[in-house]
Image (spheres, helix red, strand yellow):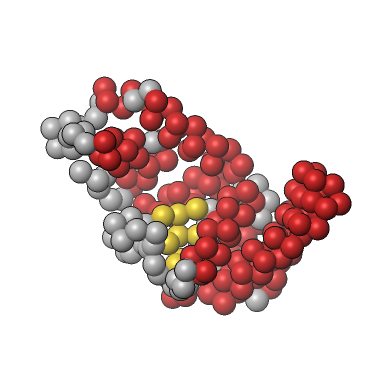
Amino acid sequence: MIFGILSAVVLVGASAVFGLLAGGPVGLLIGAVVGLLVGAVFGWAVASAGVYASDARGIFLFVVDHTWSLLNTVVGAIYLAVHLIFGHSLDRPTSLGSGRVSVVEGVSPRYATTLGTVCAGSSSGIQRHEDVHIFQARLLGPLYIPLVLANYVLFTIAPIWLLYHDHTNAPINRFTRYFEIGVYPHVWNEAIAYRIQGTPPR
Protein backbone atom coordinates (compact mmCIF):
# COMPACT_ATOMS: atom_id res chain seq x y z
CA MET A 1 0.00 0.00 0.00
CA ILE A 2 2.76 2.44 0.96
CA PHE A 3 4.51 2.02 -2.41
CA GLY A 4 1.28 2.88 -4.22
CA ILE A 5 0.72 6.02 -2.16
CA LEU A 6 4.32 7.18 -2.56
CA SER A 7 4.19 6.49 -6.28
CA ALA A 8 1.06 8.59 -6.71
CA VAL A 9 2.58 11.44 -4.68
CA VAL A 10 5.78 11.42 -6.74
CA LEU A 11 3.89 11.44 -10.04
CA VAL A 12 1.63 14.29 -8.93
CA GLY A 13 4.63 16.28 -7.72
CA ALA A 14 6.64 15.67 -10.88
CA SER A 15 3.72 16.63 -13.12
CA ALA A 16 3.06 19.78 -11.09
CA VAL A 17 6.71 20.87 -11.28
CA PHE A 18 6.83 20.21 -15.02
CA GLY A 19 3.61 22.18 -15.44
CA LEU A 20 5.00 25.08 -13.42
CA LEU A 21 8.19 25.20 -15.48
CA ALA A 22 6.29 24.94 -18.75
CA GLY A 23 3.38 27.26 -18.04
CA GLY A 24 3.69 29.09 -14.75
CA PRO A 25 0.83 28.97 -12.23
CA VAL A 26 -1.71 27.77 -14.80
CA GLY A 27 0.70 25.06 -15.91
CA LEU A 28 1.18 24.08 -12.28
CA LEU A 29 -2.55 23.57 -11.87
CA ILE A 30 -2.91 21.62 -15.10
CA GLY A 31 0.14 19.52 -14.31
CA ALA A 32 -1.15 18.74 -10.83
CA VAL A 33 -4.56 17.66 -12.15
CA VAL A 34 -3.06 15.47 -14.88
CA GLY A 35 -0.56 14.07 -12.39
CA LEU A 36 -3.33 13.31 -9.93
CA LEU A 37 -5.33 11.38 -12.52
CA VAL A 38 -2.39 9.40 -13.88
CA GLY A 39 -0.69 9.07 -10.49
CA ALA A 40 -3.83 7.78 -8.79
CA VAL A 41 -4.27 5.10 -11.44
CA PHE A 42 -0.63 4.06 -11.35
CA GLY A 43 -0.47 4.17 -7.56
CA TRP A 44 -3.59 1.99 -7.37
CA ALA A 45 -2.01 -0.53 -9.75
CA VAL A 46 1.25 -0.61 -7.80
CA ALA A 47 -0.59 -1.13 -4.52
CA SER A 48 -3.30 -3.54 -5.64
CA ALA A 49 -0.90 -5.78 -7.57
CA GLY A 50 1.90 -5.65 -4.96
CA VAL A 51 4.37 -4.69 -7.69
CA TYR A 52 7.28 -3.88 -5.37
CA ALA A 53 8.35 -6.37 -2.72
CA SER A 54 9.16 -4.93 0.70
CA ASP A 55 12.70 -6.34 0.65
CA ALA A 56 15.90 -4.47 -0.27
CA ARG A 57 15.54 -5.26 -3.98
CA GLY A 58 11.95 -4.02 -4.11
CA ILE A 59 12.83 -0.80 -2.32
CA PHE A 60 15.82 -0.24 -4.60
CA LEU A 61 13.74 -0.74 -7.75
CA PHE A 62 11.04 1.60 -6.44
CA VAL A 63 13.60 4.32 -5.72
CA VAL A 64 15.21 3.97 -9.16
CA ASP A 65 11.83 4.03 -10.90
CA HIS A 66 10.77 7.18 -9.07
CA THR A 67 14.04 9.13 -9.36
CA TRP A 68 16.56 8.37 -12.12
CA SER A 69 14.01 6.52 -14.28
CA LEU A 70 11.06 8.77 -13.41
CA LEU A 71 10.49 9.86 -17.02
CA ASN A 72 10.06 6.22 -18.05
CA THR A 73 7.73 5.60 -15.12
CA VAL A 74 5.55 8.58 -16.08
CA VAL A 75 5.33 7.36 -19.69
CA GLY A 76 4.46 3.89 -18.40
CA ALA A 77 1.80 5.32 -16.09
CA ILE A 78 0.14 7.12 -19.01
CA TYR A 79 0.38 3.90 -21.05
CA LEU A 80 -1.30 1.98 -18.21
CA ALA A 81 -4.11 4.54 -17.96
CA VAL A 82 -4.83 4.16 -21.68
CA HIS A 83 -4.99 0.37 -21.33
CA LEU A 84 -7.43 0.64 -18.44
CA ILE A 85 -9.60 3.12 -20.37
CA PHE A 86 -9.94 0.45 -23.06
CA GLY A 87 -11.07 -2.07 -20.46
CA HIS A 88 -7.83 -4.00 -20.15
CA SER A 89 -7.00 -5.60 -16.82
CA LEU A 90 -4.04 -5.94 -14.49
CA ASP A 91 -2.26 -9.27 -14.35
CA ARG A 92 -1.86 -9.29 -10.58
CA PRO A 93 -0.22 -12.73 -10.17
CA THR A 94 2.47 -11.83 -12.72
CA SER A 95 2.96 -8.34 -11.27
CA LEU A 96 3.33 -9.46 -7.66
CA GLY A 97 6.81 -8.63 -6.40
CA SER A 98 8.15 -8.39 -9.96
CA GLY A 99 8.93 -4.67 -10.05
CA ARG A 100 6.68 -4.33 -13.09
CA VAL A 101 3.00 -3.62 -13.73
CA SER A 102 1.72 -6.36 -16.03
CA VAL A 103 -1.41 -5.92 -18.13
CA VAL A 104 -3.14 -9.00 -19.52
CA GLU A 105 -4.08 -7.55 -22.90
CA GLY A 106 -1.58 -6.06 -25.31
CA VAL A 107 -1.76 -3.39 -27.98
CA SER A 108 -1.56 -6.12 -30.62
CA PRO A 109 -2.15 -9.87 -30.24
CA ARG A 110 1.17 -10.45 -32.02
CA TYR A 111 3.40 -8.38 -29.74
CA ALA A 112 3.97 -7.54 -26.11
CA THR A 113 4.80 -3.89 -25.47
CA THR A 114 6.68 -2.41 -22.53
CA LEU A 115 6.88 1.28 -21.64
CA GLY A 116 8.60 2.20 -18.41
CA THR A 117 7.62 -0.43 -15.86
CA VAL A 118 4.33 -1.31 -17.58
CA CYS A 119 4.32 -4.48 -19.68
CA ALA A 120 1.23 -5.33 -21.72
CA GLY A 121 0.33 -8.54 -23.51
CA SER A 122 3.32 -10.58 -22.41
CA SER A 123 3.62 -14.28 -21.65
CA SER A 124 6.21 -16.62 -20.18
CA GLY A 125 7.58 -17.16 -23.68
CA ILE A 126 8.62 -13.52 -24.04
CA GLN A 127 8.64 -12.08 -20.50
CA ARG A 128 12.43 -12.06 -20.13
CA HIS A 129 12.62 -10.11 -23.40
CA GLU A 130 10.22 -7.50 -22.02
CA ASP A 131 12.08 -7.39 -18.70
CA VAL A 132 15.22 -6.45 -20.63
CA HIS A 133 13.42 -3.28 -21.75
CA ILE A 134 12.55 -2.45 -18.15
CA PHE A 135 16.21 -2.96 -17.19
CA GLN A 136 17.36 -0.78 -20.10
CA ALA A 137 15.03 2.01 -18.98
CA ARG A 138 16.25 1.77 -15.39
CA LEU A 139 19.88 1.76 -16.48
CA LEU A 140 19.67 4.70 -18.89
CA GLY A 141 16.96 6.67 -17.08
CA PRO A 142 15.90 9.83 -18.93
CA LEU A 143 18.16 8.94 -21.88
CA TYR A 144 16.36 5.69 -22.72
CA ILE A 145 13.30 6.93 -24.63
CA PRO A 146 15.22 9.60 -26.63
CA LEU A 147 17.87 7.03 -27.59
CA VAL A 148 15.27 4.51 -28.74
CA LEU A 149 13.33 7.12 -30.72
CA ALA A 150 16.55 8.43 -32.30
CA ASN A 151 17.50 4.92 -33.38
CA TYR A 152 14.06 4.35 -34.94
CA VAL A 153 14.37 7.58 -36.90
CA LEU A 154 17.95 6.82 -37.98
CA PHE A 155 17.19 3.26 -39.09
CA THR A 156 14.08 4.43 -40.95
CA ILE A 157 15.82 7.09 -43.03
CA ALA A 158 19.31 5.53 -43.14
CA PRO A 159 18.78 1.74 -43.10
CA ILE A 160 22.34 0.61 -42.42
CA TRP A 161 20.81 -2.57 -40.98
CA LEU A 162 20.31 -3.70 -44.59
CA LEU A 163 24.05 -4.45 -44.67
CA TYR A 164 23.75 -7.20 -42.05
CA HIS A 165 20.07 -8.16 -42.25
CA ASP A 166 19.17 -11.82 -42.94
CA HIS A 167 17.61 -11.27 -46.37
CA THR A 168 17.22 -15.00 -47.05
CA ASN A 169 15.08 -15.89 -44.04
CA ALA A 170 13.45 -12.49 -43.51
CA PRO A 171 13.05 -10.81 -46.91
CA ILE A 172 12.04 -7.17 -47.11
CA ASN A 173 9.57 -7.43 -49.98
CA ARG A 174 6.71 -5.19 -48.85
CA PHE A 175 6.48 -1.70 -47.41
CA THR A 176 5.11 -2.94 -44.06
CA ARG A 177 7.91 -5.49 -43.75
CA TYR A 178 10.46 -2.70 -44.02
CA PHE A 179 9.36 -1.56 -40.57
CA GLU A 180 8.17 -4.77 -38.94
CA ILE A 181 10.93 -7.11 -40.16
CA GLY A 182 13.60 -4.52 -40.85
CA VAL A 183 13.65 -1.42 -38.68
CA TYR A 184 11.98 -2.78 -35.53
CA PRO A 185 14.17 -5.82 -34.70
CA HIS A 186 17.38 -3.96 -35.53
CA VAL A 187 16.82 -0.98 -33.22
CA TRP A 188 19.36 -1.34 -30.42
CA ASN A 189 16.99 -2.03 -27.52
CA GLU A 190 15.14 -4.75 -29.46
CA ALA A 191 18.31 -6.30 -30.86
CA ILE A 192 19.64 -6.72 -27.32
CA ALA A 193 16.34 -8.05 -25.96
CA TYR A 194 16.00 -10.62 -28.75
CA ARG A 195 19.44 -11.96 -27.85
CA ILE A 196 18.06 -12.72 -24.37
CA GLN A 197 14.73 -14.25 -25.43
CA GLY A 198 12.47 -14.55 -28.43
CA THR A 199 12.83 -14.69 -32.18
CA PRO A 200 12.62 -11.55 -34.31
CA PRO A 201 9.63 -11.46 -36.66
CA ARG A 202 10.23 -13.11 -40.03
Quarter of the figure with residue 56: bottom right
Apparent side of residue 96 relative to residue 164 in the rendered image (left or right): right
Q: Nearer the viewer, residue 184 or 100?
A: 184
Residue 93 spot, x, y in % from top left: 44, 75
Residue at the (81%, 58%) spot, across then down: 29
Up the image or down, 88 lies above or below 174; here it is: below
Apparent side of residue 142 relative to residue 49 in the rendered image (left or right): right
Residue 126 seen in the figure: no
Quarter of the figure with residue 141: top right
Residue 2 seen in the figure: yes
Residue 150 spot, x, y in % from top left: 49, 32
Pick the quarter of the image with the C terminus: top left
Pick the quarter of the image with the N terminus: bottom right
Up the image or down, 200 lies above or below 124; here it is: above
Residue 23 spot, x, y in % from top left: 80, 46
Q: Residue furthest left?
A: 168
Residue at the (74%, 55%) spot, across then down: 31
Apparent side of residue 9 relative to residue 44 in the rendered image (left or right): right
Quarter of the figure with residue 131: bottom left
Residue at the (76%, 57%) spot, across then down: 30
